[in-house]
Each structure stands twice: as structure tokens, then as C-alpha cells.
Image (cartoon, rainbow, N blue to C red):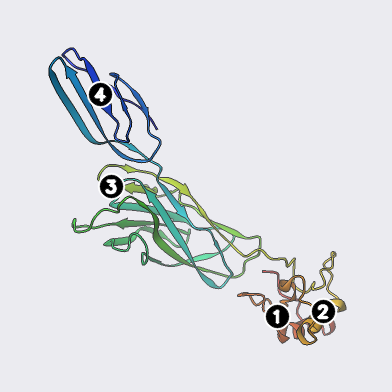
Amino acid sequence: MNVQFTASSVNPVDSWDWDFGDGNSATIQNPFHTYTSPGAFDVRLDVTSGTEQSFRLKNSFVIALADTIIESSVESYPNTQIVVTIDATNNIPLDKIILPIKYSGDITLTFDSISTVGCRTDYFELVDFIQFDAWNKKMALRLQTTLTDTQPDLSVGSGPILKVYFYMESPALATDTTFLNLDGYTNGSNSYLPTFSGPLLEYQPNLVHGIVTLPQTCCIGIAGNIDNDPLDNIDISDLVILVSFMFQGGAEPACLAEANIDGSILEPVVDISDIVLLVSYMFQSGLPPATCQ
């Protein structure tokens, strides 16, 4: 951050002595100075005019910002609860934070709850919604230290400030994603923007958005191609490999997800039900294997 400082005097000045508050100084009337670290800096100017000396000190005169809100990315399975952790870096004290979150996408997320337990903000007296729209998958949250000046400001630092819990609904495919957007939004005549507020300044921090995805899988299309046939055919060789693996100490299939015929989603569990379904599909016109998750 590059700043120009200017000074004037009605009397002749013999010397100018600037202290920029970050360990650097200058001895000219109107210097430029670059702040390379974030924070709030006190600036002092000492002036000598003949035998007279005077100074002026301005506390927190320069505020260099590199503040950020970071929303975690999450990898999970359908029909499970997920937690999105929101971290913040603030270089000046804060007493209020506004967090707008949009969470619509390929993967259907249903909002569940919020928590500050274990967060830097766990002592905040006010954590609530200033706007909530479940239908359009967006909400704006307010985190405020106190309403009665009984709690201290959030001190300079980095770390989690909020946990947001969602339920990931089914169905979902391996290629599906939902972005967790912090940019802000409008609702009618009201605008909700990501905001840091404190005794010194109100401003919008930098943002790092999150994303919800499913674990990458080696399964393609539907399960059942256990022998890794390049044409993705399901035939007797797949059944032979599955039976050998489960009952004869055979080698583990190259892609366990392909052997997860019934599509159990918490993890690719391979058990007798997978053999039953594969036999039914191949020889009894049963239902096809589950879609790859």
C-alpha cells in the first residue's frame, strides 16, 4: 500500500521528521511510503523551526488491509450432513461481521444450523440471520460481539469464525458441484454484502469461496464393470472376479466402486447383496446396478 504524506507550516521549517509507525521514517516534507504489512499504523511528524520543536501524532492514521474470508470446500456423500467452516483473517479489531452465503448448484443442499463453538467468535452475544431465503438457497448472517458494550472486539488474528451445517440430499452424481458464494446479493431493495466493521473502519474483505463436491470415483456410468473392461461391458467375467474376491481370497478389484453393485453411498462396501443383485441383473432380468456415485 503506497501512501503520500503532506505537511505545511505557517513558519519556516528547518527539519521534518516522519515516523510511519512500521519502523520506517523520512526527513522530507511530503514523502511517499509503502506499507508492506497489514495493520493499523500510528503516524507521527516532528518539526523543528529554529529553537522551537513541535509534533503531531495521529493514532491509526493509516490502515493497510489484507483481510480475508475463506470458506472451506467440502467433499461428501449424499444423504449426509456436512459442515462448512468459515475462516477470517482481520488485521484490525472488529465488532461486527456480515456473511452473505448463496448455496445453490447441482448438489441440493438444505440448511441445517450454525454454530460458533470452537471458533474465535464463540463469545459473541449476537449470531443471527438478517435475511433467510431457503427457497432460493441464500442467507445473510450477522455476528456481533455485543449490544451493550460488555464484550471486547474481535482481536487481530486468523481462524474460524463460523460453522454452517447443511444436509446433502440425494441424488447426486460424481460430476455434480455446488459453489458456496460469499459475494453478496440483493433481495428486493436490500443489499447484503460481506462486511467487516470495527471501531476504526467498515470495509469489504477479500473472499475465497468454497465448493461442495462428491468424492472422485473410478466408477463410470453404472456399477458392475469389475474387470475394468475398456468398453464398460458387464459380463460373466465381472461376476467371476467379484466371487473370487469375496470367497476365494482373490485380488481386490481395481475399482471397488464398480463392485459396489447396490450403490451403498457412505463408502463402497462390497458384500453378498452386491453378488445377489449382479446375478439378478445378468440372469434374471433384475434391476441394473446402481448409478455410480
**For the residue marked with disc 4, what is the amino acid?**
Asp
State the separation of the CA atoms marked 2 and 1: 12 Å
**Residue type, label 2:** Ile
Q: Which residue is mark 2?
A: 241
Determine crowd level at label 2: few under 14, some 14-19, many 20+ residues with C-alpha closer than 10 A.
Answer: some
Percent across and percent down for residue 115 are 38, 66
For the C terminus, the image quarter is: bottom right
* Of pointers 1 and 3, the one earlier in the residue sequence: 3
Splitting the image into 4 quarters, where does residue 26 fall? Answer: top left
Q: CA distance from mark 1 to mark 4?
A: 76 Å
Q: In which image quadrant can residue 275 be found?
A: bottom right
Identify which amino acid the numbered label 1 is placed on. Answer: Val
Q: Nearer the viewer, mark 4 or mark 3?
A: 4
> At which x and y percent is residue 272?
72, 86
Q: Secondary structure at mark 2?
A: helix
Classify residue 273 as left or right of residue 125.
right
Mark 4 vs mark 2: in front: 4
- Mark 1 lies on residue: 270
Q: Are marks 2 and 3 in contact (CB under 8 Å)?
A: no
Instruction: Tell me the CA gap for discs 4 and 3.
Output: 31 Å
- Residue 198, label in figure: 3
Earlier in the chain: of badge 2 and badge 3, it is 3
Instruction: Name the amino acid type tagged 3.
Output: Gly
Relative to 213, is 236 above or below?
A: below
Crowding at dot 4, Cα within 10 Å, few <14 / some 14-19 / many 20+, comes out as some
Query: Who comes first in sequence, dot 4 or dot 3?
Result: 4
Q: Residue furthest right?
A: 236
Q: Nearer the viewer, residue 208 or 289?
A: 208
| Residue occupying the far top of the picture | 12
Which residue is under mark 4? 17
